Amino acid sequence: MESSTVRGNWSGRVGFVLAAAGSAIGLGNIWMFPYRAGQYGGAAFVFVYLGAVVLIGLPLLNSEILLGRATRRNPVGALRLLSPGTGWPVVGWLGVIAGFVILSYYGVVAGWALDYTWMAASGQLFSSTSGSMSGAFEKLAANGPRQVWWQGLFMLATIFIVSRGVEQGIERTGKILMPLLFGIVLVLLGYSLTSDGVERGLEFFMRPRFSELGWQGALAALGQAFFSLSLGMGAMITYGSYLGEDESLPGSVAMIAVADTALAILAGLVIFPLVFTFNLEPSAGPGLVFITLPQAFAMMPAPAFLASLFFLLLIFAALTSAVSLLEVAVAFLVDEFKFSRVTASVGAGAIIFCLGLPSALSEGFLDHVDALASNWLLPVGGLCTALFVGWSLDRAAARKFYAAGGSGRGFEMFHFCIKYLAPVAVGVILLQNTWPVISGLFAG
């Protein structure tokens, strides 16, 4: 009981769902999901994505949360408690390491959104002297000290929220930012659906074009479902450790997945009508958000207002995800080394900020650490989680953890998916990511 008091708890189901949905909803929902859907056949991609969420994402999400709730520990402590004297706690360490790595460069990207919000609100983004949008982004990407400044402000906000505790910090932030996030999306959606390119944009995004999907598109949809739900990084194990046993796990998990998917689809409905209204070319990653969309905003009424709203949306999405990443490290330090929450938050946040400096100061470094996390750390963590729950954890114990707070309905389907489908699917993702390296070694 003492440990629970020190660590904190969610006040209830709503607080947990909003916080966990905030962890899942991030920058990838806003730029990567719409781009990939457009690239790989519109609704055809969405159909495969939804199937992957149901058959792979939900079982893995259930698994991570039930591990945390059953043990009330961080990822390392949870696996040590459930499987003492084995190597399984290494999987927890991977989650903690992934949190450090991802947040180190995630803070830099969030800093770009802060910078653009300031430029949009102050009128600099659309001033006649600011040059092209492409030039503006290149100028920011080449200015290390400027990126460090915004990265530092973002990390300070993240540290402050986490240091306030589970209920007063993380949960309260989720209750404020999640409604604001969806509210901003709906305002932007109203503008987008009245634009001249709405018909072409919706056609591009929502019409199923299975001929454009292919094997590569199916794998992209599978990977999007996996990464979009914050799997493999220990965040959901950590958040689950603050959840009471009287809360129904499958119902809460379903609400998290619905919120995450809804935001991604709404983002596509916002972006593509604007892109097609002004005959712009959709592009991947930062280009879509920091170059293409600002060009669209510049040609609309009240461009500063619309751009400010959009980049605030990015900041809110980034902040709720960053909080969960930092919490993984903080929970680990509180559980394993008995640090106070404030000390753990400041210490871990400072280390992560320093780890992010190379991403801010060196062009190209960010891409390398992103590839390390996305291609290696997260898939390995997700694969091992599936293998642990499906094959190592006693079936009766898994059923008990799953059913706590509810009837246990759906356990058989859950266990089948986590034992067979999830390991195969995540293994395919891992193989896809590592095959170029393997083939390169043999070719060499």
Image: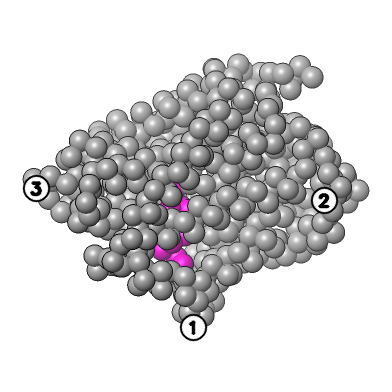
Judging from the image, what secondary structure is the residue with disc 1 in?
helix
Other-residue count near label 3 (Cα within 10 Å), few / some / many at <14 / 14–19 / ≥20: few
Please determine whether, in this image, residue 116 is positioned above or below residue 379.
above
Q: Which residue lies under the disc numbered 3?
A: 128
Counting from the top left corner in percent of width and height, residue 19 is at 59, 37
Q: What is the three-letter code of the residue carrying label 3?
A: Ser
Q: Residues within 10 Å of mark 1 (few under 14, many from 20)?
A: few
Which label's residue is closer to the chain start, 1 or 2?
Answer: 1
The residue furthest left is 129
Tell me which corner region of the image, top left, top right, bottom left or bottom right, holds residue 52.
bottom right
The residue stretch that appears in magenta? 27-38
In the rendered structure, are the residues bearing label 2 and label 3 in contact, judged by CB atoms less than 8 Å apart? no
Question: Residue 211 got which mark?
Answer: 1
Q: What residue occupies the far right of the structure in this picture?
A: 396
> Which residue is situated farthest in the bottom direction here?
211
Specify the amino acid type for callout 1.
Ser
Residue 151 inside the magenta-drawn segment? no
Q: Secondary structure at mark 3?
A: loop
Point out the image quarter for the C terminus.
bottom left
Picture residue at 65% right of the left edge, 56% below the top: 57
Left-right relation of 187 to 321: left
For the residue marked with disc 2, what is the amino acid? Answer: Ser
**Residue labelled with disc 2:** 392
Residue 410 lies left or right of residue 5; in this view the side is: right
